[in-house]
Structures are given as C-alpha cells and as structure tokens.
Image (tube, rainbow, N blue to C red):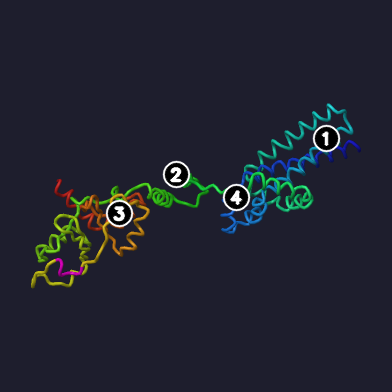
C-alpha cells in the first residue's frame, strides 16, 4: 500500500511539473500583439489569456516557482524510499521525459487553447507564489524592460498573406489574397510604371473645333474623358467629359473646346508613389490625372489604371472589347 501511495504521489508531482513546463512554453509561444488583436475581435480564449501574457514576467515567475517546487518534491519523495543515486536518476528520467519533453511538445502545438484552459490554475499559482513572484516581476521589469512591439515589414506581411493560398482553414479566397498583396506593393511602384504614355493618349487643344467630324473621331477613340493640353504639352486646361456633349447639336453650329466646361485636374510627378494616388484622385475630384516629367506632360493615369494594378488584372469595358474585336477583324 505504501508503494501505491508513493507512485500516486510521484505521478501527481510529475504531473504538476509537466503542466508547469508545458504552460511555460505555451506562454512564451503566444505573440502579444496577435493575442491582443484576437481579444479585440472577441476571441474568448485570447481574452482569458491576455492579462497573463501582458504581465508575462509575473506569470513566468509563478509557473517556474511551482515547477521547481514540484521537481524538488519529487526528488525528496524518491530519495526517502531509494538511495540517493537511484532516486536522482529516476527523478531525472521522469522529469525530462514526462515533465519536460512530452508536455512541451503537446502544449506548444495549440498554445492558446491549452493556456486558456489552464488560466484559472495559473492565476492560483500567481496567488500562492505572489510574495516571491511579484518581487521577481519587478526585478525582471527593471532589468529587461517591457516587451517591445515588433511590426512586420511590408514583405513579411505579403508572405503572411500568401500563406493563405491553398489553405483550407483560411477565410481569404484567392481573389482577396491577390488584392491585399497588390495593395501592399503600391508604395514600391511609381505612377510612371502604370501611366498611359502620351503617344497613346487621345487629347485635344483648347482651340480645337468641335463639329460633327471631330465628335465622330472622339467617339471612335472610345474615351469618356478627354484631357485638354496646349500644343507644347506643358499645360493642362482640364478634362472634357463626353457625357456633357450628348445634348449639343454639332450639326447646327461649331464650338471650340474652350467653349465647353473643362473640369480642372492637377499635374502629378511621374515619381509619385502609387499608395498616395488614391488620395490624389480624391483631392483632385477627377478620375483622370496628367503625369509630368521635367515640366512636360508625358502621359495620363486613371483611377481604373490604379485599380487594375491592385487587382493584378486588366479591367475591360465594352469599348476595350470592341476595339480588340476590330483589330482581330482587320488582322483577318
């Protein structure tokens, strides 16, 4: 009977040591910022664990004190029944295998889950060891300071997002992943990389005569917005909207471009980063902005160009499809 009691006592002590060892690893495996984000989103496990992780030095001291106490008690119990060398050998094997390796391997896999389940026990450990663990916390805080936040770089965020592709547990589909990755890369690209070169831009001058022939040319170009430049391409007078010309009868009279309403739009440097372009479009109140380099207009960019860069795909409208169909027909 005495042997049975001893085995039960040893099992309980090794179990406490295993719990403490696993919780120690689980606590340190939890990233504080990730835990805080999950708590804000309502994750109940994160809400329970966050206070313990926030005061990690106090929690760590309490867990380790209980762990060392359990290991020491195990050694003392065995030494009472066995000689010192054998007791030390058995204690070492029990603690290393069942008190360290197994629990750490298990609890590290689902750190948040197990830490949440054991949160009441950890709080009890803190209460019991508080006279010692609290001074240790203050000492550790003074020596090593509070844990500093480490933000991921743009490339690291991109890699994290890419890991969602093909993962069954991910809430993001392929399109969402591509959109997020495209948005993260905007600051690394310049507007010159996506602009339409001036040689491919349909533009007019302020003195251009708007008659039925010119209107037919504009229709053939398939543009809803026409930028108005001077002939030297050094100044933009604004943007002419095709929809505002619909009710005008150009068969009865001729008009100059500057007789129409021209909507002002600023010039943007070709080295402007793409992540600032949305704000530029909002402030300009325009979906088309001319691009300049060395005091000369070298192209235009539209909000559609920017969206295509984020999506990673070209957005084709009816005009684009008609233009491609005409090219294929001519090729035949």
State the residue in front, 12 or 263.
263
Q: Which residue is mark 4?
A: 32
User: CA gap, disc 4 to disc 2?
Assistant: 21 Å
User: CA gap, disc 4 to disc 1?
Assistant: 36 Å
Q: Residues within 10 Å of mark 3 (few under 14, many from 20)?
A: many
Quick check: 46 left or right of 94? left
Which residue corresponds to the image point at 24% horizontal and 58% vertical from the top-left?
318
Q: Which secondary structure, mark 4? A: helix
Q: Residue furthest front?
A: 142
Q: Which residue is mark 2?
A: 155
Q: Which secondary structure, mark 2? A: helix
Residue 264, above or below 84: below
Mark closest to the chain's N terminus, 2 or 1: 1
- Residue 75's disc number: 1
Mark closest to the chain's N terminus, 1 or 3: 1
Which residue corresponds to the image point at 32% horizontal and 60% vertical from the top-left?
281
Task: Report if the CB atoms under discs 1 and 3 are less than 8 Å apart.
Answer: no
């Amino acid at each position: 009977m005495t042997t049975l009691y001893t085995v039960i006592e040893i099992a309980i002590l090794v179990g406490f040591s295993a719990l403490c060892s696993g919780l120690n690893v689980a606590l340190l495996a939890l990233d504080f910022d990730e835990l805080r984000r999950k708590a804000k989103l309502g994750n109940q496990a994160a809400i329970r664990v966050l206070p313990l992780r926030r005061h990690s030095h106090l929690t760590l001291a309490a867990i380790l004190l209980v762990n060392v106490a359990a290991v020491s008690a195990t050694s003392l119990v065995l030494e009472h029944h066995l000689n010192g060398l054998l007791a030390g050998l058995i204690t070492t094997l029990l603690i290393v295998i069942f008190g360290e390796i197994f629990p750490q391997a298990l609890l590290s896999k689902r750190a948040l889950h197990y830490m949440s389940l054991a949160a009441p026990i950890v709080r009890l450990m803190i209460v019991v060891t508080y006279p010692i663990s609290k001074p240790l916390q203050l000492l550790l805080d003074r020596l090593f300071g509070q844990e500093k936040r480490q933000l991921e770089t743009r490339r690291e965020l991109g890699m994290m997002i890419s890991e969602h592709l093909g993962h069954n547990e991910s809430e993001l589909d392929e399109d969402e992943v591509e959109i997020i990755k495209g948005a993260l890369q905007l600051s690394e690209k310049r507007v010159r990389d996506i602009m339409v070169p001036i040689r491919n831009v349909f533009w007019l001058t302020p003195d251009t005569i708007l008659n039925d022939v010119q209107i037919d040319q504009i229709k053939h170009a398939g543009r809803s917005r026409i930028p108005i430049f001077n002939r030297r391409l050094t100044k933009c007078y604004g943007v002419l909207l095709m929809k505002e010309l619909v009710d005008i009868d150009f068969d009865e009279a001729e008009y100059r471009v500057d007789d129409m309403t021209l909507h002002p739009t600023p010039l943007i440097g070709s080295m402007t980063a793409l992540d600032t372009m949305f704000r530029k479009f909002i402030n300009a109140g325009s979906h088309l902005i001319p691009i300049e380099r060395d005091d000369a207009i070298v192209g235009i960019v539209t909000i559609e160009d920017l969206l295509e860069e984020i999506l990673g795909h070209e957005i084709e409208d009816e005009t684009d499809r008609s233009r491609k169909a005409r090219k294929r027909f001519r090729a035949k």
